[in-house]
Amino acid sequence: MRRKPSTELPRFVIPHPPSSQWRRRHVLFVFTGLLFVLWLLRSRRACPEGDGINWRKYAYSLYATDGATLCHAVLVFDSLAKLGSKADRVLFYPDAWDTVISDSRDRNSQLLVIARDKYDVKLQPIKLLTVEGRTRDGFTGTWQKSVTKLMAFSLGYYDRVIALDSDITLLKPIDELFLLPDTPIALPRAYWYKVDPPPLTSLLMVIKPNLEEFERFKDAIQEGGDTAIVQAHKFDMELVNERFEHSALVLPHRPYALLSGEFRKKNHTAYLGNPWETWDAQKIYDEAKLVHFSDWPLPKPWIMWPLEGLAEIQPDCGGSHQGTCAERKIWKGLYEDFRARRKDICRLLSVPAPDWSKIKASAPGDNSTEVQG
């Protein structure tokens, strides 16, 4: 077998060391790649759901003035979590409270910890806002501090905040409201008022936080309000209407502001928005996103019904006190669901039923969210 001459054999060639230009280019590529990875990670943190929206710029705001409203705020946070809400959550509460659980009966501290640890709520201890000259609510005996909801205007580190009352049930997600066109405030009208147009209702407010606006509200609150307005339990609503009545973006009350009392009424034209549509209780319930409890003179859902009051006030199913109908089934179901969640999440039982004769004898407050049957 012929051996190959040395000139035909493969040669081992020592490669030239890489040039300094190539090394610089290599470092540049690596550096650029690292920057891209860092940007990608930061973008994913800013838009955790990958939908291109920075949900950290938005928040839901609720407030608590006592143990009951604290529990009900936690119920709303629970609903937001279950409905897949992506925005932050903020809770204003009295600065006398803390998150140190002293014993098993320290329910306020327990609920604050649940809100913080389970629902990722940002806790904001504050001195509650109080209308000067206001004494006590005639029925519940609690101090009137609902104007504390206006603290939402102080959250200047958010682009938009949704401020909610806590005596509600959320049925569907409402995150889409954060993406409304730019406006200082958006809210529904109190469709149950018998004036045209109805006033704006503060039970749901989509707010562009503004510290100057907040200071103006504080000044008005500290000056006190008209006696009739304050005694009507609607001072926060009055403030909002005086400021934004002619400039607010009006949200459709259908589906964002359905009162529980609507299922007791006989004329539904105001809610339907027209006189020709046929009322369908199940359809209305299915399309609603938020229900606000309002069935004066029956108490709110955390207070048990007086049996006489229930028989008198519940949906009458066309005059029948036997059996049931869609209106009665839905109406009772809303209350039963609220009480069950209050017991399961807050570990709180309902308040015993008050004396029905005393409730009926008291003058009905023209509350901003109360509707007569």
Image: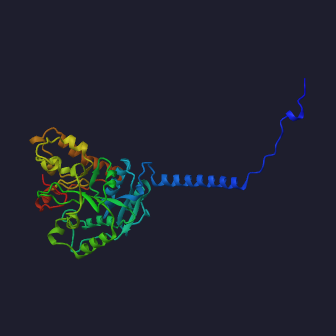
Name above or below for residue 132 compared with residue 153: below
Rendering coords of residue 224 (x, y %): 21, 74
| Viewer-closest of 24 and 182 | 24
| Viewer-closest of 142 and 180 | 180
The image quarter in which residue 348 lies: bottom left
* Residue 189 in view, yes or no: yes
Say which residue appears at 69% left-offset and 52% top-offset.
22
Say which residue appears at 62% left-offset and 52% top-offset.
29
**Farthest residue, direction front:** 7
**Farthest residue, direction left:** 319
Name above or below for residue 190 compared with residue 340: below
| Viewer-closest of 289 and 50 | 50
- Say left or right for 273 vs 118: left
The image quarter in which residue 229 lies: bottom left
Name above or below for residue 134 compared with residue 260: below
The quadrant the N terminus occupies is top right
